[in-house]
Image: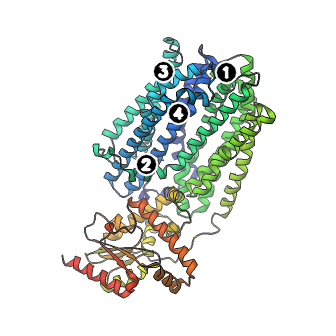
Amino acid sequence: MEKIFVENNKALGTEKIGKLIRRFAVPCIISLLINALYNIVDQVFIGNSRLGFLGNAATSIVFPITFISCAFAWCFGDGAVALMSISQGQKDDKGVAKIIGNALTANVIAGVIFMIVCFALMEPLLRLFGASDASLPLAEAYFRIVLCASIPAMMGGVLSGVIRADGSPKFSMIVTILGAVINIILDPIFIFGLDWGIEGAAVATIIGQIASFGLGLYYVLFRTRTFKLKLEDFKPKLKTIWQFTKLGISTFITQISIVFTALVGNMMLAKWGALSIYGVDIPIAVMGISMKVFSIVINIVVGLLVGAQPILGYNYGAEKYERVKETFRIAMIGTVVVGVVATIVFEFFPDLVINIFGAQNELYMEFARKMFRIFLMLVTFTVMVKAISIFFQAVGEPKKATVSSLIRDIICYIPLCFILPNFFGIDGVLYAAPIADVVGVVIAGTLAVRFYRNLGKAKTTVAVENATILESHPGVIITISRQHGSAGKEIGKLVAERLKIPYYYKEMLAVAAEKSGLSEGYLNKLNTRDEEGIMRDLYLGSAPAEYAMEAQRQAIQEIAKHGSCVIVGRAADYVLRKNKRVLRVFISAPEEYRIKKLNEMYGDKPAEARKAIKRSDTNRASYYKMISGLEWGKRENYDLCLDSSIGNEATAKLIVEYAKSMDER
């Protein structure tokens, strides 16, 4: 997704939805279709060569194994781009460079491990994914060559996303197109002209991958806009790698689920195909072709929804729920249209598609027609489930997104693949897909309908604060981070009153809301979500949360320009880290003291107070870690750490004295 900074994104809340979707979705669809084409070209030429369906069976066996490396590459890549956008917003060029360097390093490490494991266990792996005695030699020949380019292939995927996030989506598209074009040109030359067979297809593929990687590397080394890579940026930092890996975990889950579904599908087709008239190789070859064709359909839908993500994310954060609904309606209509058109083709004209990959014997054609008419019978439901999952990601609902993403493939399809063939033979594997589609669309659809109907009903309301930034004299800016129940807000007010300087807490949110167009209510609840652990990180990496964090960062920096003040919360200490006149304060207190305070302030009973303390402190720590990469509350990150159990007045007095001493320097 092209990064849109908050100061330039108000058009997302005002322009016509259709125009915005065309602007953002079309480039995404084109890029993804090119990727789909990349994967299909080999099978088209192989199927029309002397290799026939055995060659296609071989590539169908290898393809899901290579997706393991893709899962890691896209996990690191998507996570790095999400983390990169946060650092870009903070104008942290060094941080951006470190993220990208570490993402590339992580890919090299993962690629080396992947190659070692695959070379060492090649035959067992290929057998596991369905290779027969007839297809194994071809699969090994293809896999050996493709493996050699694992690292540039993985890094190419990361570089493409990084280039887009750097503000060069057209160059990113050229990087992708280059590899596909080279592959298309070289495939017939190597397969037919030089008669290299399946090895020729593999060589054409890796040359295209290496070319894409080379062009992408050229960009990040010499043409970047927002960062400059240095050799030291490639030195692995486990903290940085873990940060972007967490943000990319949803992508990893999605991609690795493809591997498992392909593995189980191939295993069952091999087992039950051997007991049928079709044998092992025909079903696996046809499955590979059907999935490659389906990738065209799914990539159109994914491109449409990914293109809609910034529109959905911004308007959700702005609490413009009618625009969120309209965007989702248009995206779902587009999804259904694509699915219906595909269904008509697969049901009524399967031969047109099948023959593209080479006309084979009648037994092959019979099973291929079955595959397209049964396995892809409810492809409309399949793409609807995928669209709903991406929608939930876009509006910051990671739990619903995860359920929607996994329900069809992992929870339904895989068990059905094991169960149904016992009753229906090899046809049971085919019927597993439409049954899983029905279950998936019912559950994901129910979640979507409920969410859609409730949008706007529970609109966040907060007391509207003054969005005016008050002028102040030059001096120390005091940032206060605090544990829940430590009375940090009250202490901050006391400090501001004694120093006669402005105080910002909700006022800062009002400034952020006014300047960004986001809702003050949404900004206010950013740290009150119930998710924990990975789900919390996924939420903070979502589009609306990113917009909100960027809006708050800009508001804090704008406030700091107007002179001495007190700013409470929102990682202000880190946002203003380059300002030498900042006093970074962290206020804590023993738990029993905080429980007592929460009872005094809000009437919370001890059990309620303990839960509130745990939830709030966890959320604040996650937010701070996401913004800064540092540990919230760690003494080394602050200038002054105080225990407020000495009393509000005494704590405020210490801060005032410290601030005055800074002013005197």
Q: Earlier in the sequence, mark 1 or mark 2?
A: 2
Q: Residue furthest left?
A: 665
In the rendered view of the protein, which quadrant contains the C terminus?
A: bottom left
Q: Residue furthest right?
A: 423
Numbered disc 2: secondary structure: helix
Q: How far, Cα to Cα, is label 2 from label 4?
A: 21 Å
Q: Position of residue 479 (x, y in %)?
A: 35, 73
Q: Amino acid at mark 1?
A: Asn
Q: Earlier in the sequence, mark 4 or mark 1?
A: 4
Q: Is residue 656 above or below residue 43?
A: below
Residue 472 is left or right of residue 375, and the answer is left
Q: Earlier in the sequence, mark 3 or mark 4?
A: 4
Q: How far, Cα to Cα, is label 3 from label 2?
A: 33 Å
- Residue 80 is labelled as 2
Mark 4, Cα crowd under 10 Å, few <14 / some 14-19 / many 20+, is some
Q: Is residue 352 above or below residue 408?
A: above
Q: Position of residue 228 (x, y in %)?
A: 30, 46
Q: How far, Cα to Cα, is label 3 from label 1?
A: 21 Å
Q: Is residue 16 visible?
A: no
> At 64% from the left edge and 38% from the top edge, which residue is drawn?
261
Q: Earlier in the sequence, mark 3 or mark 2?
A: 2
- Find disc 3 in the rendering and name its residue: 185
Numbered disc 1: secondary structure: helix
Q: How far, Cα to Cα, is label 4 from label 1?
A: 26 Å
> At 26% from the left edge and 79% from the top edge, which residue is drawn?
658
Q: Amino acid at mark 3?
A: Ile
Marks 4 and 1 close (CB-CB < 8 Å): no
- Find disc 1 in the rendering and name its residue: 355
| Quarter holding residue 603 | bottom right
Q: Amino acid at mark 4?
A: Thr
- Find disc 4 in the rendering and name its residue: 66
Mark 1, Cα crowd under 10 Å, few <14 / some 14-19 / many 20+, is some
